[in-house]
Image: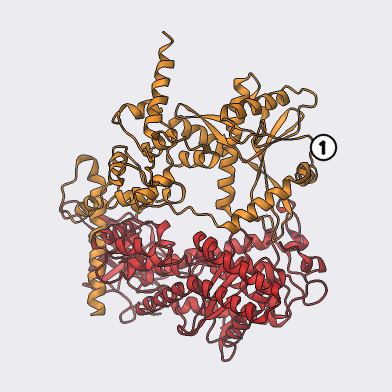
Chain colours: A red, B orange
Amino acid sequence: MSTLTALARAEAVAVGQAQRITTVRHLHVADRPLVFIPLSMAGEANAPLAALVGTVPDDPRLLVVPQPRNRDQRFGFAAELAEVLLPYLDSFRGVTEAVAANRGKEVRYRYVDAPQVLVPNSAGIGFVRMFGRSTRFRRTDGDYPVQPSVPLLGQWLTFLADRAEHPGSGMLLAMTEALGLHWATGQSALEDAHLAALLAWIDPADGLSGADAAVVAEDPLRWPPAGPATDPTFDNEMLAPAMAAYQEAVGSGDEVRRSRARGVLEEAVRSQLGPTWELMWRGVSLLRELPVGSRVPGRWAEDRDVFSTFTLYVDGGGYPQPRRDGAVNAAQRLHRLERALQSYAVQRAYDDPLVMADHRLTGEAFVGEVTLADAHRIDDSGKRRVLRPRIQVTTGDVVLVTAGAVLHSPSRPGQKARVVFVTPDPASGRTDVVLELSGGLGRSLSPAPGSVPEVGDRLCYTTLSDSFMPPGEFPSREETPWTHGGPPKAYEEPVEPSVDDAREEWS
Amino acid sequence: MTSISMGTSRTTAERLATIRGGAKPKRHNARTIAALTRNPGCARRAVLDTAGVDKQRLAAYIDFPARFGQSGFAIARGNAFEAQVKASGAAELVKLLRERLGLPIPEVAYDDLETVTGREKETAEVRYARSRALLLRAAAGEDGAGTLFDHPLLGLDVAGQRVYLEPDLIAFQHEGRFHVVEIKSFAVVDGQADPGKVSAAAIQSAVYVLAMRQMLAEAGHDPEIVAHDVVLVCPRDFSNQPTAVLVDVRKQLAVLRRQLGRMTKVEEMLAVLPPNLCFDLAPDADGVPTRAPEALVDALQTVDARYAPDCLSVCELAYFCRAEARGCTAALGTSAREELGGIERVETALGLAKGELTPADDQAEAATLLRNAARLRAEVLVAAAGAAG
């Protein structure tokens, strides 16, 4: 947590309401997101109990597993979920756009829109990942056959869960994290993981302070947990009897009784899911109200790219993702995530002066006014005369950069600014920084109009760079060194699920 | 006259009994000790736990109920899994130890030490004596000394007081070396499990390792014959089939030793507390505690707490302490408090940030940072509001 965010938390305590920590929205909010609230059965390994799912606030679809330990019912749930999710995914596979690839030598196509799945919290993402794992290796033949949609669902859920790890991706988001990215509450990060309490701080009920509203929101009777774990009291007092009654009704062979018992069970789980459903859509509207950051569409385009690529893979009969990554794949993936993380952090700072303020506070960026400018300065010390304008920026920020450092300005991408002098003035507390500019000036020895900042311009310069980072190099999978376990094992590669995979035991 | 130390310890025991107020002491288990070491600076928790006060009831009575309810489904599954692993003289467990861990176990004797005489109300002392005798025999390498010891009762000194651990482990002895075996019902899927659950299990196991080592050392054995690798038995993937992994708990042992060592001796804590301090929840004829909740709140406030958001997941009194800590930067989390320069109160931090307060000498550095942060935040927000308006 940065000092600015901590300060915003302190302000939230004093004001009694969450405080903004960004000036823009840093994630894409789809026009038609799919909200998915899963519940799992306590004590079991990711056994689905129920879910509310849908793309329209007033039309949630309820899925229920009356006996979560029953294998057939679990995969019945998976098939029902697939009935909702797969058509939703397919609905984005209409219109494509051409994108230049390989430096304009090739053209590839990507969908103009992509799916976005919203779950309440990071445990919800964990549920998606585990349910993907438990369904993608199933087979449609042999022992325990499942609907063809089930393994497909598993591949897609795994895909989404993988994307959720990718910084800046918006294909699978946890609402608590999406909101926490933009607001600081007057409580701890641990308590922010409770969706109702978090929203109580952001948007407290009339007349309540955020703190009081959050205490009310923590009452599981008013606001049941947002899942996947259920409230233990609900389990013991409502769910267990309702399940037992259903079980008995099934045993009696009386269809009317069975359907009535199922109704009771459905109402019970609906009572737990309904309030969270409302909170999710409140979260969506709060996010939509924020102005979107300028680099968000670019990141969403990357999501659309990845979505388009994966649809091709699935259409081509691609095998399910392996249980674990092999060494080379794992290293590549980690490398991708690190690059994405860095670029995401830079992009957010470039998009948002409030995020950049974090870097100004730590001396990695400063904002100041141009007090001198020599736009036509020529450097003739080398073989060739080159245009190297110099400007002096005067700032009241802490400046920790030293001569020789290369800086960038978010408003002038493509232009580098090398620090020539840093002259602090202890009397005024201000610092003069002389910068030599290169790039983005046009081709001649006199600068293109507007390419050099003018005296009086207010600018931000930072050590953060949004420029392209070349990817690292890795050995081929077959050449995995023995220190890393040698070439991948079968479970580390995408392969056709075996009969044994399909027989995997279930409690 | 006996020695002074015995006199002191009798007084301490009496005072702890007064604090508890007639009720039977709540027994410690590895989880409560592990939790205790999470926040060793909290005197309130240390005093209540050492005295064995029922914090759950206390918290509920003063209207800050803890939310540690357990789902019947989870309990049932946990019990079923444990029973399955231990069935028929722990047959499945032995198979796992042989196959997965490659331990050559020729013959197995399984002793359940849950009860000694079959009577339910045995004192901890009786059970401890029995566990100690059997484990020491095994440590001495006597013939037929046993292989698996289920539910041995162990003791550990916490804050200068001997506490007994309500056990939930099996001690496994092979060729004079002991392993702690812990059975948990969270799944290990593709060799991976919930890191939070694994680390909780590791620290609990470390408590058992420490207690066993302490017992052996007291009897003159080499404490290192208790392995620092504990055996964690969990369901594999989505099935009920158990799988076993070795977990190295050396790090947890070091943490535990350090934290237990740092804990103030309970005598010292009691010395600064009112002599009549008491959390008696003794009920009247209607089953309602005779003391008013306000009196208990007053009593609680005489013992300093050190609240941190982490407490919510480990301590029954956390909701009370959280309400008390409103307006403290610590309630925002450790990192927020640090970023605010370690300033204790939110209003002080804000006062310094706005330049309304003059910083004390030790706040000067923090004040500069906070003023800078506040200036930046205000500047950007004003500009953003201007742009939007």
Q: Residue A317: image x %, image y %?
A: 74, 80
Percent x, y of residue A455: 22, 72
Residue B21 appearing in the image = yes
Residue at 37% from the left image edge and 30% from the top image edge: B18
- Quarter of the image with the C terminus of chain A in it: bottom right
Residue B121: image quadrant is: top right
**Residue A102 visible within the image:** no
| Front residue (pair B178, B289) | B289
User: Which residue is drawn at the image coordinates 38% and 70% (left, top)?
Assistant: A350
Q: Quadrant of residue A380?
A: bottom left
Mark 1 neighbour class, 10 Å CA radius: few under 14, some 14 to 19, many 20 or more: few
Q: Tell me if B386 is positioned left or right of B181 in this view.
A: left
Relative to B318, is A291 above or below? below
- Residue A358 shown left or right of residue B128 in the figure: left
Question: Is A176 on the left-hand or right-hand side of B294?
Answer: right
In percent of width and height, residue A430 lies at 21, 57
Helix, strand or loop for disc 1:
loop
Q: Nearer the viewer, residue B277 or B282?
A: B282
Quadrant holding the N terminus of chain A: bottom left
- Residue carrying label 1: B104
